Amino acid sequence: MAENSNPSRKRVALIPGDGIGKEVVPAAVKVMKAAAAAGGRDLALTEFDWGADRYLRDGTTLPADAPEMFRRDFDAILLGALGDPRTPENKHGADILLGLRSKLDLYVNARPCVLFDRRLTPLKNRTEDDVRFLVLRENTEGLYVGMGGFFKKGTADEVAIQEDLNTRKGVERIIRYAFKHAKARGLTRVCMSDKSNALTFGHDLWQRVFKIVRQEYPEIEASHQYIDNLLMQMVRDPSQFQVIVTSNLFGDIASDLGAQLAGGLGLAPSGNIHPGQVSLFEPVHGSAPNIAGKGIANPLGSILTVAMMFEYLGWNDEAGAIDRAVRAALREGKTPAELGGTLGTREVGDWVARALAKQ
Ligand code: NAD
Ligand code: IPM
Ligand code: MN
């Protein structure tokens, strides 16, 4: 990433992946191109065909040189989704998605839950002001490190172990990121969520680190909620949250719930980030095999993901323009079935791209 010194030209890798990933990424790319063109920016796009088809064809998942190549040749990666009913063990998804998160050391998974239009939340009497928070998910450790194994697999005496790895450095950097982010955005509240009442080693570390880091930010109101309570509170009164910081698995779960509070899983963007390094952006949703191939998937989450990516790359005006165009689509009912509209995936992308050209 350091080799590209031209702020108006960015090199973006595309990994559409599986299922609806192959439908929403093209729509997002159309919008990406329209936004870049409107801002006089130059994009170099390179597509990679990694996913279930390729894996089943020749066994390729994440090529060994891929992390180095992304670091050297790209500024950002846009990914659709990985997961296919033909490969239920999800070997390729783990290698590609979790592999990139870990090998590129993308320790921040930023998942904004922002309600753009009050008609879209399932919560009663809630408005845009009530659902506006960010889930910061630790993205390289926890229960996702793949440590563990089976003993006597397939027998009545089977033992299966899955380790929960928490390092001082890993916990500290995501917690510090949460406070830094809040401060930089003029926000005043950070809530850390763990399960330290039951996970008395790993999450005891989260408790202790949180207490140390919060002292560096006396202007931020730092609170703590156990994860079970947090999920309940997100439904009861989401307006209490600005920034939530939590572990890998808990953040995965909290971000699907938050996505629905903000209107739907198909609307939710995310960024897998290591500040200053090549980072990976993807919608929060998966490959949705139940609707794949029908052309009805909501591409707005992927489109908002492009806005997040542009903001990360320093293209703030273009990011803002995408945000406004998506808001216009929602206001005018130019939406897919998930949001009660009648437009298909491609039509929604085309509408947003046209709106950008007109802005
Ligand atoms: P999912 O997110 O794919 O789908 C959950 C539900 O939400 C489904 O009913 C689906 O139709 C709906 N949905 C999701 N995205 C939508 C969109 N854009 N528009 C309209 N509706 C949408 O989760 P799942 O069903 O648990 O998983 C399916 C596959 O995706 C699995 O293989 C899973 O491992 C994988 N997955 C991948 C990612 C990723 O690549 N980041 C994320 C989650 C799940
Ligand atoms: C996500 C997904 C992944 C995760 C799966 C596909 C491994 O659910 O990005 O939210 O759990 O991180
Ligand atoms: Mn998930």
Image (cartoon, rainbow, N blue to C red):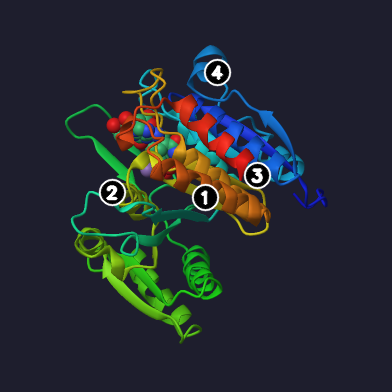
Give the camera-side residue of 63 and 77. 77
Mark 3, other Cα within 10 Å: few <14 / some 14–19 / many ≥20: many
Tell me how far mark 2 sits from mark 4, CA to CA: 41 Å
Tell me how far mark 3 sits from mark 2, CA to CA: 33 Å
Identity, as a three-letter code, of the amino acid under mark 3: Ala
Give how far across and how far down residue 36 sits, in percent. Answer: 69, 42
Task: Determine which residue is flagged by label 3.
Answer: 76
Q: Which residue is rendered at x = 71% and y = 39% of the image?
A: 37
Q: Disc 2 beta carbon < 8 A from ligand 1?
A: no
Looking at marks 3 and 2 on the same chain, the residue that comes earlier in the sequence is marked by 3
Asked if residue 243 can be seen in this view, the reply is: yes
Mark 2, other Cα within 10 Å: few <14 / some 14–19 / many ≥20: some
Asked if residue 201 can be seen in this view, the reply is: no
Looking at marks 1 and 2 on the same chain, the residue that comes earlier in the sequence is marked by 2
Q: Which residue is rendered at x = 65% and y = 44% of the image?
A: 76
Corner quadrant of residue 184:
bottom right
Corner quadrant of residue 26:
top right
Picture quadrant of ligand 2: top left
Task: Determine which residue is flagged by label 2.
Answer: 119
Is 92 positioned to the left or the right of 7 in the image? Answer: left
Looking at marks 3 and 4 on the same chain, the residue that comes earlier in the sequence is marked by 4
Give how far across and how far down residue 279 sits, in percent. Answer: 61, 48
* Callouts 3 and 4 close, C-beta under 8 Å: no
Is 3 positioned to the left or the right of 282 in the image? Answer: right
Looking at marks 2 and 4 on the same chain, the residue that comes earlier in the sequence is marked by 4
* Callouts 1 and 2 close, C-beta under 8 Å: no
Asked if 106 appears above or below 233 in the picture, the reply is above
Tell me how far mark 3 sits from mark 1, CA to CA: 22 Å
